[in-house]
Amino acid sequence: MIGFVKGRIDEITEDNVVVDIGGIGCNVKISGETAAQLSGINGEVKLYTYTCVREDSFQLYGFLTRDDLEIFKKLITVNGIGPKGGLAILSVMSADNLRFAIISGDAAAIAKAPGIGKKTAERVILDLKDKVSIEDTFVSGKMTQSNEKTADNQAKKEAVEALTALGYSASDALRAVNMVSFEEGMSVETILKLALKNMF
């Protein structure tokens, strides 16, 4: 319904921001991670939003990137994870770290979110493991795919696979590759060498 809200920050709490849009204060629920990144009172903000309509309420949930919004929308498809649970998870980990946890089966990392138990975290992994991929962690919500970027992402994917073949966990391998200062056209071997330095 509402794709995004943009305006001046009037008030911030741990889980809510009031955005002044032409003299109207709009309440938007946010994660702790998002709250920490906001510029502060009177700063400008643009939040991509998810609209939750229920019998007794109409609530907006806001995110600084489309990527965060998309992972939130995936999260709330999981049985037992409503919008509140989705925000709780994204308050303790970024979208990329959540993907790492799902791909590597790290339920303990997801269960660190308040109100999310081990069984619920395991359900998140079970339900979403086929809906997230290694490629997702290399492409921000702002990027558009091109043949060059597809080739570069393939090189990163192969580097991750090589690291896991060496005995590193998928989560550690993904983090190490993501930490590489990447240049277009970089070879798998170069990515691998630089990523290995990040493992120590």
Image (cartoon, rainbow, N blue to C red):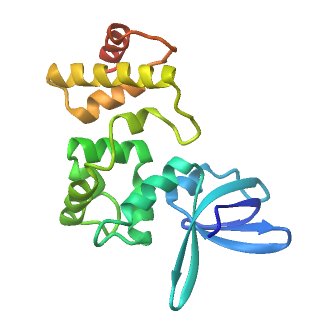
Q: Which residue lies furthest to the bottom in this view?
A: 56
Image quadrant containing the N terminus: bottom right
Q: Which residue is drawn at 44% across and 70% down?
A: 83
| Image-quadrant location for residue 151 | top left
| Image-quadrant location for residue 175 | top left
Q: Residue furthest front?
A: 147
Residue 10 vs 169, above or below: the answer is below
Query: Where does the image place residue 159, in percent across and percent down from the top left?
Result: 30, 19
Query: Where does the image place residue 140, in percent across and percent down from the top left?
Result: 51, 38
Residue 141 vs 157, above or below: the answer is below
Residue 199 can be seen, yes or no: no
Residues 36 and 132: in front is: 132
Residue 1 vs 132, above or below: the answer is below
Q: Position of 148 compared to 38: left or right?
A: left
Q: Residue at x 28, y 71 (%)?
A: 79
Query: Where does the image place residue 65, in percent across and percent down from the top left?
Result: 57, 48
Residue 53 can be seen, yes or no: yes
Query: Where does the image place residue 160, in percent across and percent down from the top left?
Result: 28, 24
| Image-quadrant location for residue 198 | top left
